[in-house]
Image (spheres, grey):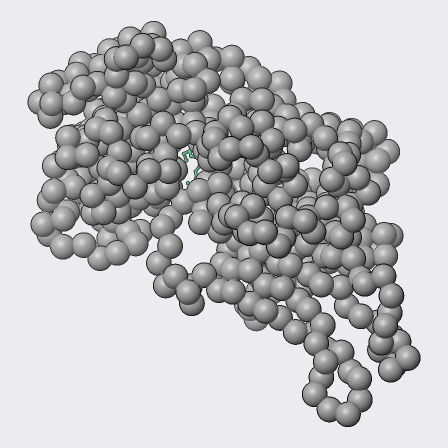
Amino acid sequence: MSSAPAPAATIVIFGGSGDLARRKLVPALFELHCQGQLAPETAIVGFARSVDSDEAWRADLRSALAEFGQTAHGEEEWLAFAGRLFHARGDLKQTQSFVDLKARIEAIEAERGLAGNRLFYLAIPPSGIGDAAARLGEAGLVHPAEGPGPWSRLVVEKPFGHDLASARELNEKVHASFRERQIFRIDHYLGKETTQNLLVFRLGNGIFEPLWNRRYVDHVQITVAETLGVEGRGKFYEESGIFRDIVENHMLQLLCLVAMEPPVAFEANVVRDEKVKVLRSIRPQTPEEILRDTVRGQYAAGSIDGRPVPGYRQEPNVAPASGRETYAAWKLQIENWRWAGVPFYLRAGKRLPKRVTEIAITFKTPPIALFRRAGVLVQEPNVLVLRIQPDEGIALRIGAKQPGPTMRVETVKMDFKYSEHFGEKTPDAYERLLLDALHGDPTLFARRDEVEAAWELVTAVLDVWRENPARDLPNYEAGTWGPEGAMELLARDGRRWRRP
Ligand SMILES: NC(=O)c1ccc[n+]([C@@H]2O[C@H](COP(=O)([O-])OP(=O)(O)OC[C@H]3O[C@@H](n4cnc5c(N)ncnc54)[C@H](OP(=O)(O)O)[C@@H]3O)[C@@H](O)[C@H]2O)c1
């Protein structure tokens, strides 16, 4: 939240040789370095098995920056950044590696005049998170949460568990070494500028909040559509599916931000209290209701942008008769005073015609059809669209009179584009989230009860799906907007999905 440089610390990236570190974390840290947001003493220490030395890690990260960095950099900037980089070779499964890591960190801290603040970033396979957190504690690398001394914080990537029981178990394990205020569970959607703008838009303007309720809103649609398939991650997808991968975290987070009550202060626990209340207000569904109000889909071969693409079952490491979903739609009801009776429709899918993440709020039509006599029979409802990515912005669809002697109403769009007003470059979500973790601000991170409440809802659906396998998969062609069942889900309510 602050624009002052972050407090000096040692940032330890477990999984420093991995995809996330190379593609997102190190480029984000480099940007922060170039902007003067990192204190001069701050050190970045990688931890992995396959990297032999500081030099080897630096060389690898230099090519990662060339490939994934946001801005081109000069030799001088690189050398200054490289001076912060160190690598401790080790195996997460070995206690000795953590003992060695501690000695290495202490040496680096002494050399660079660091007071001992430590940010541990677990960019490692999910199965290793619980044990890594426990070993950090056992090795004495974690400072106590209380007291005036240096701090230790843990950043954990998604997925945080794969169902309610495993999320609870993981929380227990992590809590053996870290207190809740030391734990930063990442959902990178929360670090996106447009996601944060959602709150500013709603609560920093006087004109929207009065309309933001059951009296004026007809329904809400949240869409996360991708044109990509599983892109070589067949094994991961077979275990996960889109409901765990996207709906459980990103989509429920967006839902919370749209639906929550205005917090009394923009403070971490106050905001997170309101988000948890939304999750707890979602009406629990019986198994019959789950089967009625959810839709599973899986893509068959088709074409994207005129290019033929294989079906999910033909992707590498996918079972030839896989029942895993690559599309999901879900109708939810939030039972509170603000939203009772307003359906929220969520859909996420791979191999859809367009890459788009958006929230569309459809308002009720005016109570009287004033222009009916003039021949205007149907007036389209107003729709407010919050585009999270790409083409970030906000659009409002309104009716306007077509010029001419007859009364014709046409739907037009008022469109605000982020890039047009603020320029093309917006900070990557990881820049913001890393900075917040260094500042100790957990507002944009998920709290324990939030994660567990989300998993509770999602696990109820997954359990019913497991008991009732879908028999019609694959049920949509790549390059189309998903299965017929998803269209019927809205048609039953007299509505239809938007075509973004
Ligand atoms: N990639 C993304 O865009 C992305 C997005 C969201 C979330 N995530 C999450 O971020 C985490 C990392 O993902 P990733 O894509 O970066 O995975 P990855 O490319 O497979 O990298 C895993 C990293 O963990 C290290 N590692 C694995 N086992 C180890 C062990 N026993 N001891 C020491 N190091 C070990 C690997 O290093 P060595 O093999 O050299 O030991 C490697 O650096 C996962 O939890 C993933 O779900 C990733």
Asked where in the image residue 465 lies, by quadrant, the reply is: top right
Q: Is residue 405 left or right of residue 253?
A: right
Seen from this angle, which residue lies furthest right? 373
What percent of the width, then of the height, locates residue 435?
Answer: 33, 36
Q: Is residue 465 left or right of residue 179?
A: right
Q: Is residue 137 left or right of residue 389?
A: left
Residue shown at 69% from the left, 27% from the top: 280
* 327 in relation to 425, above or below: above
* 339 in relation to 276, above or below: below
What percent of the width, then of the height, locates residue 140?
Answer: 29, 8
Quarter of the picture holding the N terminus = top left
Could you say which is closer to the camera, residue 391 or residue 463? 391
Residue shown at 14% from the left, 48% from the top: 77
What percent of the width, then of the height, locates residue 453?
Answer: 64, 25
Asked where in the image residue 132 lies, by quadrant, the reply is: top left
Q: Is residue 205 left or right of residue 400?
A: left
Could you say which is closer to the camera, residue 33 or residue 127? 33
Quarter of the picture holding the C terminus = bottom right
Observer able to see residue 99: yes
Seen from this angle, which residue lies furthest bottom? 405
Could you say which is closer to the camera, residue 31 or residue 407? 407
